[in-house]
Image (cartoon, coloured by chain):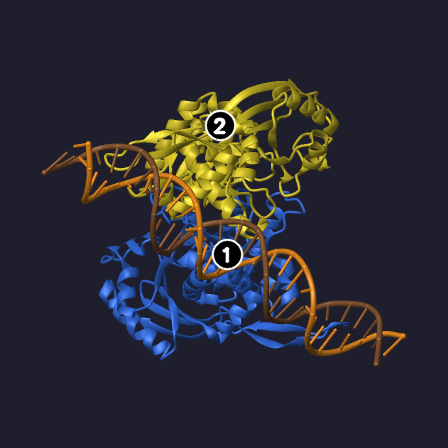
Chain colours: A yellow, B blue, C brown, D orange
Amino acid sequence: MHLAYLRDYHEALVIALARAQPTIERGTVAEVTGLTPQAVSKVLTRLVEGGLIAPAGVRRPALGKPAAVYRLVPESRWAIGAHVSRKALRLVLTDLAGAVRASATTPLPADFTPDELLAGLGAGVTALAPGRELTGVGIGMIGPLDQATGTVRGAHRLRHWHDVPLADLAGKRLGLPVLVDKDVTAAVTAEAWRRGAGFRDAALIMVESGLGAGLWLGGAVHRGTHTNAGEFGHTVVQLDGPLCVCGRRGCLEAVHDRAADPAAAAAVLGTGVVNLLQTLDLGHIVLAGADLLRHGEIYRSAVERAVRTEVPRADWLTVEVALTGLGTDAIAAGAAMQVLNARYGLPDPTGA
Amino acid sequence: MHLAYLRDYHEALVIALARAQPTIERGTVAEVTGLTPQAVSKVLTRLVEGGLIAPAGVRRPALGKPAAVYRLVPESRWAIGAHVSRKALRLVLTDLAGAVRASATTPLPADFTPDELLAGLGAGVTALAPGRELTGVGIGMIGPLDQATGTVRGAHRLRHWHDVPLADLAGKRLGLPVLVDKDVTAAVTAEAWRRGAGFRDAALIMVESGLGAGLWLGGAVHRGTHTNAGEFGHTVVQLDGPLCVCGRRGCLEAVHDRAADPAAAAAVLGTGVVNLLQTLDLGHIVLAGADLLRHGEIYRSAVERAVRTEVPRADWLTVEVALTGLGTDAIAAGAAMQVLNARYGLPDPTGA
DNA sequence: CTACTAACGCAACAGCGTTGCTAAAGTCCG
DNA sequence: CGGACTTTAGCAACGCTGTTGCGTTAGTAG
């Protein structure tokens, strides 16, 4: 039954509008989506029955019958996101709107095993959402990993993590849908989910235990053929430059880390970002990561300056440069929103 | 009526299969697409009525009723592609399978005007496809341009080309649908159209009056927010390197063009390609462009070597490196296939 | 000739958005 | 106050998509 795809697609479209605007109503949704008002009525009815949106009074036009107004019900759905770093497990509870409503941090033993992580995850999830019905759990961590199967191929500098089917293991343990993804990809999903449509081509640049880029292209996550996209820090910006941990010379990350001070590092990053813009023509650059946010405004202004001045860029090449609104919770929150996005975001034609 | 989207989507899926394989049949299509055999029957019937596919005998299984076999009818649809360079207008006629069936080259006057191009285009199109019903005409050229509206913003080093609504002008003159796009984007479309599914994430690297990359991400063209993606040659690979025409220092293009010989140039390009792979995790790299193909095998082997050795890349990170099968016709042929892709490729949800 | 297998295809069906029309809830104006 | 007008809402019938159910067809095997 492939009609379900149309239904899910239009419901996701309406939910996205409701996320981005304080209220929605039949007429404006019909205009934006291209559906007829009658069709929108049916969609809205279904969403109200599902509890995802609720009536919120009326708007009185200058003339004619008042229009029914609806709003998103953020408390109708919940998801938990986990950020696994080498030292700690950070958990956040987010609502349907993408707001972080609770959080907790658990330390992880040095060189922790999959079992140790699963134990922490199990305890943390029940503690964070007692009795609440969860859509699922998302896990964001460093790669390389295979997002499609939820398998960690071999997390950098963690001994016990080779070909671990983390999504399956955690799913069985928690009894919930579990998605595993690279930290940068999760983080960019958080930005996209909170901004709604209009955020079509973007990169989230993260400086935190490495330098990476989460890519949001054409209104969806870009993960690449082997779900390994985003190794932006290991692109060469200085031929025959300093040796990088990856074995090449002059990687963006290597040059960036050797900079004299934050301002110089930010300038290097700016050049890398302009490289990305030249190749991908993005509309938004979001800056994130604990190491970057420590000098957030220095980085933001440096990147913005690079974007504006490094190339004689025409006035129609507008790019927004911003710091993430989620701070250091971007990864965990993004992992949670991957779950929400999988269930309530635009459906994938190939998966239906 | 949004049901039309489902219909178009499934028809496009079947056409894509028919392009990639010599023959198709009901059962295998059903498996691949996830549709029921009955639904596939209906799709096949519609396509046969449209003349896009035709019965091609039967396949006799070991047991049971023979299965009806179908094949694409390449001669059922035609499109013309134009490659506009600074000196000449190259036109090709392609069939539904993406094969070039006729071609012609017309010289263009120095610093030609829009009217002069339109005249050449009009004469060429009628000469190339006398009496044949055409799906449309595609035009590939250097940017910057706005693909969405088909407007040339200001072609590099052409005086009379500022904010010219080329698609509209040509469409009125020819009485056919006209699409305008950047040369690299057109070229990558050609590769994708001829290969069918399985070609999900790829870049076409072109060296010809500049250095650019056409991007095919997630099974569709990536053009970016301002339809200006692909300026790959103007990414910095050598901080404080030689001055580039674009004003920055150490652009890939600048370093590449200053190399001592083709082998050295190819090695530089190889580093750039690895940068692209690190960021985007592509499955295919296609090399094209007149200047590159002049030393095709040197470039191909150098890029392949870079991909295999520059990073300790894991064995699961497989990448195919190949020269375009269309030679110097890649741009013109790709422009033609953009027209076919728009009409018979996977439909765009937002456009329906 | 009968049993079995695999593909085919007609007919009824479910569910999506659309169309056509009527009703409802306001304002405006005489 | 009441009728004309405007805008929104919603019921009912419809068209079209893919699905389901089941009988038919064209082969092989014994």
Q: Quadrant of residue B249?
A: top left
Q: Residues within 10 Å of mark 1 (few under 14, many from 20)?
A: some
Q: Quadrant of residue A267?
A: top left
Identify which residue, B132 or A184, lies in the foreground. B132
State the CA–CA distance, disc 2 to disc 1.
Answer: 31 Å
Q: Residue at x 62, y 49 (%)?
A: B308
Look at label 1 and name its amino acid.
Leu
Identify which residue, A265 or A37, lies in the foreground. A37
D21 with respect to B205 (left or right): right
Q: Are marks 2 and 1 on the same chain?
A: no
Identify which residue, B114 or B132, lies in the foreground. B132
Q: Dot 2 lies on which element?
A: helix
In the figure, B50 relative to B146: above or below? Answer: below
Q: Is residue B237 visible?
A: no
Q: Is residue A43 visible?
A: yes
Measuring from the top left, give residue A59's x and y in whole percent: 32, 31
Measuring from the top left, give residue B197's x and y in whole percent: 56, 58
In the figure, A164 relative to B215: above or below? Answer: above
Measuring from the top left, give residue B307's x and y in whole percent: 59, 49
Please count the marks in the image.
2
A221 with respect to B121 (left or right): right
Q: Dot 1 lies on which element?
A: helix
Residue marked by disc 2? A74
Identify which residue, A167 or B69, lies in the foreground. B69
Chain letter of mark 2 equals A
Measuring from the top left, give residue A318's x and y in whole percent: 33, 39
Chain letter of mark 1 equals B
Q: Residues within 10 Å of mark 2 (few under 14, many from 20)?
A: some
Residue marked by disc 1? B6
Look at label 2 and name its amino acid.
Pro
